[in-house]
Amino acid sequence: MDDEEIKYFVRIRNTDLDGTKTVQIALTGIKGIGHHTSRTITALAGVDPHAILGKLDDETIGRIAEAVETYSEHVPEWMANRPRDVYTGKTRHQLGADLTMAIEDDINRMRKMRCYRGVRHETGQKVRGQRTKSTGRTGMTVGVRRKKD
């Protein structure tokens, strides 16, 4: 293919990916896929991770899309983003809107059971044990006001 025939947008998993980037970097545009996962997907699909995504033919893009769909079946449990799902008990790797909904459901479940993390989410405070004395002070007045003479 010539430079004139590049596809600027490639649609995989209901997401428009940048066709001018390499396959490995472009796949990170899908929520739930990072650098390590994208590298694994390119290996599963048998595609060069440094190839430009927009210059690939439709058959190769189809192989990439299939590798994205069947990712959790080909990798160990620790590489999936939802190992031992709470509701099904199965290992799944969720992407895009499914991942967003799953995270919201998890936070709502923690709020309902009134666990520590749920309460922290509810009040808008830090959840993972960070210090809060000097950081995260949003919504309050900043600075010192001088007393008028």
Image (spheres, helix red, strand yellow):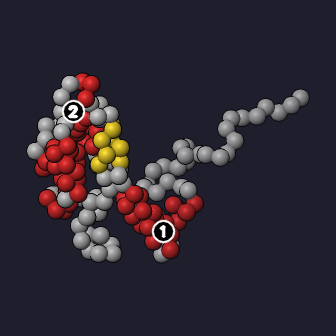
Is residue 104 visible in the rendered image? The answer is yes
Which numbered mark, 1 or 2, is in the foreground of this view? 2
Task: Write down the quadrant of residue 57 in the picture.
Answer: top left
The residue located at (23%, 67%) in the rendering is 91
Quick one: 149 or 57, which is closer to the camera?
57
User: Residue 103, percent across and down?
Assistant: 41, 61
Is residue 29 visible in the rendered image? The answer is no
Give the quarter of the figure containing the C terminus: top right
CA gap, disc 1 and disc 2: 43 Å
Quick one: 4 or 128, which is closer to the camera?
4
Task: Write down the quadrant of residue 59 in the picture.
Answer: top left
The residue located at (59%, 45%) in the rendering is 137
Q: Is residue 140 left or right of residue 38?
A: right
User: Residue 79, percent across and down?
Assistant: 21, 56
Three-letter code for the amino acid on which mark 1 is drawn: Asn
User: Residue 61, percent across and down?
Assistant: 20, 44
Classify 10 Å Cα crowding around label 2: few (below 14), some (14-19), many (20 and above).
Answer: many
Residue wearing tag 2? 55
Vertically, is 140 above or below 123? above
Three-letter code for the amino acid on which mark 2 is drawn: Lys
The residue located at (72%, 35%) in the rendering is 144
For residue 108, which numbered disc appears in the image? 1
Kind of element beneath mark 2: helix
Give the quarter of the figure containing the N terminus: top left
Quick one: 49 or 131, which is closer to the camera?
49
Residue extending farthest left: 46
Q: Is residue 14 left or right of residue 138?
A: left
